[in-house]
Amino acid sequence: MSDTEVVSIVVPVYGVERYVGEAIRSVLSQTWAAFELIVVDDGSPDRSWEAISAFSDPRLRAIRLPANRGVAAARNAGLAAATGEYIAFLDADDRMHPTRLQRQLAFMRRRRDVALCGGWCRTFGPDDDSPRRVARITIDPRAVNASLVFGNLFCTSSIMMRREALPPGGFRQRYAEDYDFLVRVALRHRLAIVDEVFADYRLRPDSATQTYALERKKRDVWESQAPLFEALKLMPTEQERDIHLFARTHTGRVDAERLTEIRRWYGRLVRANRRTRLYDDEAFRLAASHMWFDQLYRATGCGLDALRLLFREPLSLVHPQPLSLRAKFVAKALLAREFARG
């Protein structure tokens, strides 16, 4: 692999003076040296700019926007300044693993058919005092593109892509602007999730994703997904829209009635894809099955109802989940049944 392939890492910053230095150091410590780090301060009200300015590494380019314009505008400012053949993203409160760029570049070199890839992220608390766990994504490689119809499996701080695959206009300002971006890339290119840990993702109660109103979340997600439904030649009813957004945004408790409605909706999506052939039929069913199990897992409080659907619904068995995860699901559902009995 040539050591001259430049990666542009774009880091949007807003009000994270406590964390941005750690994020920058994680990039400057990469084993892959051919990179440029573009840090964009989006009009931070705190001392984030001072924290950025404390670094003097020549590979770091700092941009200061005169006023807060939102994370999409900050990312786009970074993209406009980028010169690398590859683009990587990192949020200012997250951390790269030291060999991330080297490992992702090796994957992208092997897989010329892939335009964008992500990987696993470890999660940790705001003060690095919470038990860490790896957010593993066990999904068949053939199902990654189709999975975006149902939700988002990507951690933004683990994404690398080829420059030529950037969609027109870059990021658009809205809730889950990263998902909206991925949808537009996936309509033209192949995506992948690498079975490796690339970053640490910081869980903060005051992060942007936690502060959007629910109705705004639903509106933005629906608008982002509209091109996918159009490509499937599908016009969902109002009830189907509500069910899809309920499942997509993980809001509210999944009871037996909701679970049945989700199953019917996913079945309709599978039939629509079979009719339009937007995705390979097996790949789409793999994606639907993966996300269906995610909904089942949310519904373990339904006890036997969830267990029945696990074993009686054909969609449950299309995408094999790890045995340990299925065993945990069964145990939780049985415990919920016993608890309901009193």
Image (spheres, rainbow, N blue to C red):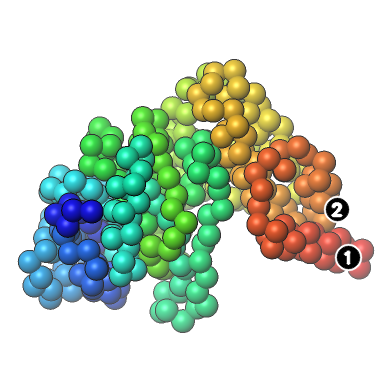
Is residue 251 visible in this depiction of the protein?
yes
Dot 2 or dot 1, earlier in sequence: 2
Q: Nearer the viewer, residue 335 or 110?
A: 110
Q: Where does the image place residue 80, in percent across and percent down from the top left?
A: 15, 44
Q: Where does label 2 land, which residue? A: 304
Position above or below: 84 against 36: above
Query: What residue appears at the point 13 percent right and 73 percent down from the top-left corner?
Result: 55
Q: Where does the image place residue 124, in percent across and percent down from the top left?
A: 46, 72
Query: What residue appears at the point 82 percent right and 65 percent down from the top-left corner?
Result: 335
- Looking at the rendered structure, the kind of residue marked 2 is Leu
Q: CA distance from mark 2 to mark 1?
A: 10 Å
Query: What residue appears at the point 62 percent right and 45 percent down from the top-left corner?
Result: 290
Position above or below: 148 against 272: below
Q: In this rendering, would 322 be left or right of 195?
A: right
Position above or below: 248 against 2: above
- Looking at the rendered structure, the kind of residue marked 1 is Glu
Q: How many residues crowd mark 2 within 10 Å: few (<14), some (14–19), many (20+)?
A: some
Q: Where does the image place residue 304, in percent across and percent down from the top left?
A: 85, 53
